[in-house]
Every structure is written in C-alpha cells, then in structure tokens.
Image (spheres, grey):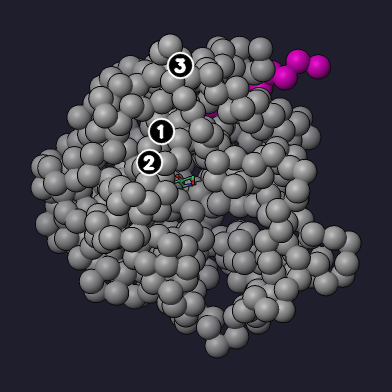
C-alpha cells in the first residue's frame, strides 16, 4: 500500500526563539535566563551564545520564502517572552510584539499556518531573580504574558502551544543543572514542574477567552521506554522511568492526577499542590504535541537515587550525533500507547529529527542518514494513522541548524544548513526530500 497521508495532513517545521533569532540586545529585548546562562563560562560548549544565532530576527523574510519554496504548510516557532515583556512583568515592549506580528503576517501571506509556542525556555532573567518557575507566582506572571500575546495575535493565530517540554525545563534546568537556570535542586525541580503545568492550565482558558476558535495544546517530550531485559527488576525500572518522563506530565493533563507510583518515589520531594490545581491543569485541550527523538532503555540500578534506573545503550543500534538511538518503531508504539491510555482528540508530532555531522561538498549537503531517519519516522507515523491514531501533522526539528543549548552550535539538526560565518542557508538533501514528501503528501 502506498504511504500516503490523509488529506490536509499538516507538514511543518519547527524552531525556537533563542535558538534562531539572535538580535539579543535589539529593539528593547530584555535579558533571558539563556543569555545569562550562556554568557557564564563553562555552561555552553565553546562558550557559544544565542547573541546572533541564525540572525532570523533580521532574515525572517528570506526564511519564510525558503519555507514556502519547500511547500511547508505550517511553521512552529516560539515567542521570546523577554522581547515582549523585557522585565517579565509590567511594561510591554511594542517593538517586540511588532516583530511577531510581522512574522505572522508574512507566514499567512505565504500560505503557511503559524503554530505559536508561548514558552520555549527563555524566561526573562528578571523573573528568575524573583525565584523563577519554582516560585508559585510564576503561574500569574505567565498568565499575564499569555494574555498580552494572545490579545495581539489571536485574530490571525489559531494554533497555540502553551509550553515546550516542561520535563526538560523542570529537570534539565533545575535538577541536572545542564540548562538555564543551572540549578541542582530536586525539590525545586518538582515544584517547577507543577507550576509549569498549572500555568499551562491557566493559559488554556486565557487563550480560549481571547481567541476565536483557538486550538490549544501542550508539547511534551515523550519516550517509548523499554526494559534492558526480561528480568522483573528491569521491567519495574522501566515502569519508574515511564512515570518520570511520560506519566508525570500526561496524567495530570489528561486525567487530573499525578501518577501515584512516581509521587511515592518522590516522597518528601513531591511538589506542594493546592486545592483546585489539578482541575485547572486538566482543562480540556484540543491537541497533544509530541516531541519524539528516541526510546529510552533502562536497567534496575539501586545506586541511582530515587529512580533506581540506569540508561542502557543497546550496542547494535544506530546513534545520532547526540548519542540518541535511532528507533522509529518507538514513535509508532508511543503514538499507539498515547491513543490507548489518553485518547487525545488530536495529536501533532511537534518535533522529530536528528543531528548528524553534516558537511558542505560542492555547495551541497548529502545528509543521507537524516533522509533515512525521516523516511523511517514518516512510515512509523503513517502506520499509527492507519490504526486509528488521530495524528494531524508532523513538524521536523528543525528548519535551520541552530543553537543546540548546552551543545552550542556543535550539533546540526536542520534540514537547512546554516553557515554561521556568512549566515548563508543551504538546503540539505533532507530538505529536498521533505519538499517531495510534502508535494506527494506521503513517501514518494
Ligand atoms: O533543540 C531541542 C529543542 O529546543 C527542544 N527539543 C529537542 C531539540 C533537540 O535537542
């Protein structure tokens, strides 16, 4: 059977503000936690920062033209909170809002549907100075910001994503210290997770109020989790890992409760939850955004605190430059599982892609491994659709090579190569392949 997707399937590409915009000190933009973090020596490989990035702030018209040349139906980008409200709360920066206003108009004129992510990790530093996400006030700060943005854009933007990967924000930023704000405090991490979710719930009602027919969702980074062996101890470890990466966020959003097994593991570290919080968190959403890159294989390990689960790398597997296993079957299984356990009204793959060591040769980038990665993940997504999963669209991560957080510019995820010295964009073979997939609405 030909691998053709349903009519109207949304083929898109995704980016995020701090990773591509640059113009860090222009037009009144305030400082974000990523400016502070990346400018602190030792935090980011090679001392890279997002000061210039892909200079998308200035080059967005060319980038939109490039998207149009690929036939993209949708573009997922994020809004930099400190561009819009430099101190996080209070005065609105008109020039910041104008930028996104122009971008939205430019996209619509090119026939590209904007999917707006409201928070993709660049918290205003001024709010971090007040305690950041572990402070319950963050919920109100976010609500005000969401109201400002949605009042301005919701006459043209239909698709809204409240948060991108709250697991990463909470745990990579507050427990592992690898992302901004660089904290290593398990209690703060769990409290941040709860506030991120609560702020999501409140944002849902604000977006509905301000937007006529707004389609609202949240994007979670989700994994298919396998035990390293059939041993009961490994199977139990996989269940704990699933609680930590998947159910900790899915359950409150879709079921209005935290998974009790994971909360028991957390013990005294569990977040403080007030009455009514879970009701707000589980406000009905229109779609779930899924970021899928790889599966997670774990073995029981009593030496790992709390989770007692250790990541295992299957030796025969293929790995990307991030050290992530290429495992398209996990996407299929994850989508089926989401449908069975949570039955979201609609799903979008809001990120999927791979970093490989790309090289320009005679003006071309022959990234055949990325082409294969995409092809296999498209096939996995298609199978899930055949079996009834309401998957409505797919966004490749990423449109452009960009600032890969703690790895700086050393990892290239784009289907478009960026020469950071000249800002030249070169379509990789994967971009040409994607263009053909979009034109055929399936695998050519
Ligand atoms: O670059 C990130 C993105 O910001 C969030 N999801 C994962 C990507 C690759 O690491």
Residue on which the image places disc 2: 409
- Location of residue 81 in the rendering, given as x and y in whole percent from the top left corner: 26, 52
Which residue is pictured at 53% across the width and 34% down the height?
Answer: 356
For discs 1 and 3, the disc positioned in front in the rendered view: 3
For discs 2 and 3, the disc positioned in front in the rendered view: 3
Residue 361 is tagged as 3
Which residue is pictured at 61% across the width and 71% down the height?
Answer: 258
**79 versus 1 height, above or below:** below
Residue on which the image places disc 1: 401
* In the image: residue 314, left or right of residue 135: right
Q: Earlier in the sequence, mark 1 or mark 2?
A: 1
Residue 432 versus residue 346: which sits nearer the camera? 432
Calculate the distance from the C-alpha at mark 2 to the C-alpha at mark 3: 19 Å
Q: Is residue 4 magenta?
A: yes
For discs 1 and 2, the disc positioned in front in the rendered view: 2
- Location of residue 342 in the rendering, given as x and y in whole percent from the top left corner: 68, 54
Residue 261 in view here: no
Calculate the distance from the C-alpha at mark 1 to the C-alpha at mark 2: 8 Å
Residue 236 versus residue 46: which sits nearer the camera? 46
Question: Contact, CB < 8 Å: mark 1 with mark 2?
Answer: yes
- Location of residue 100 in the rendering, given as x and y in whole percent from the top left corner: 24, 36
Which residues make up the magenta segment?
1-10
* In the image: residue 160, left or right of residue 336: left
């Amino acid at each position: 059977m030909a691998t053709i997707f349903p009519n109207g399937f949304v083929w898109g590409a995704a980016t995020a503000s701090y990773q591509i915009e640059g113009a860090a000190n222009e037009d009144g933009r305030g400082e974000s936690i990523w400016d502070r973090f990346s400018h602190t020596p030792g935090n980011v490989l090679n001392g890279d920062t997002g000061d210039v990035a892909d200079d998308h702030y200035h080059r967005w018209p060319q980038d939109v033209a490039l998207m149009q040349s690929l036939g993209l139906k949708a573009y997922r980008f994020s809004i930099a909170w400190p561009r819009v409200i430099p101190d996080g709360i209070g005065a609105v920066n008109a020039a910041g809002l104008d930028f996104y206003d122009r971008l939205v108009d430019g996209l619509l004129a090119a026939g590209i549907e904007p999917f707006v992510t409201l928070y993709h990790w660049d918290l205003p530093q001024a709010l971090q100075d007040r305690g950041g996400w572990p402070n319950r006030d963050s919920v109100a700060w976010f609500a005000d910001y969401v109201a400002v943005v949605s009042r301005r854009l919701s006459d043209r933007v239909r698709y809204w994503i409240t948060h991108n990967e709250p697991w990463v924000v909470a745990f990579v930023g507050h427990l592992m210290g690898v992302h901004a704000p660089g904290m290593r405090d398990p209690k703060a991490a769990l409290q941040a997770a709860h506030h991120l979710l609560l702020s999501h719930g409140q944002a849902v009602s604000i977006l509905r109020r301000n937007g006529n027919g707004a389609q609202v969702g949240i994007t979670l980074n989700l994994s298919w989790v396998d035990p390293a062996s059939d041993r009961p101890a490994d199977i139990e470890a996989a269940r704990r890992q699933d609680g930590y990466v998947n159910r900790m966020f899915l359950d409150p959003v879709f079921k209005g409760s935290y998974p009790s097994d994971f909360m028991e593991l957390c013990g005294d570290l569990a977040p403080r939850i007030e009455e009514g919080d879970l009701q707000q968190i589980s406000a009905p959403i229109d779609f779930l955004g899924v970021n899928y890159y790889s599966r997670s294989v774990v073995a029981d390990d009593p030496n790992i605190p709390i989770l007692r689960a250790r990541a295992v790398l299957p030796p025969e597997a293929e790995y990307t430059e991030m050290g992530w296993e290429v495992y398209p079957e996990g996407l299929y299984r994850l989508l089926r599982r989401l449908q069975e356990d949570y039955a979201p009204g609609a799903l979008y793959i809001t990120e999927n892609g791979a970093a490989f060591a790309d090289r320009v040769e005679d003006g071309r980038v022959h990234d055949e491994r990325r082409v294969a990665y995409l092809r296999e993940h498209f096939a996995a997504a298609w199978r899930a659709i055949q079996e009834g999963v309401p998957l409505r669209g797919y966004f490749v991560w990423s449109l452009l090579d960009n600032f890969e957080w703690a790895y700086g510019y050393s990892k290239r995820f784009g289907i478009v190569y960026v020469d950071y010295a000249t800002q030249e964009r070169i379509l990789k073979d994967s971009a040409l392949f994607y263009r053909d997939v979009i034109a055929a609405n399936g695998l050519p």
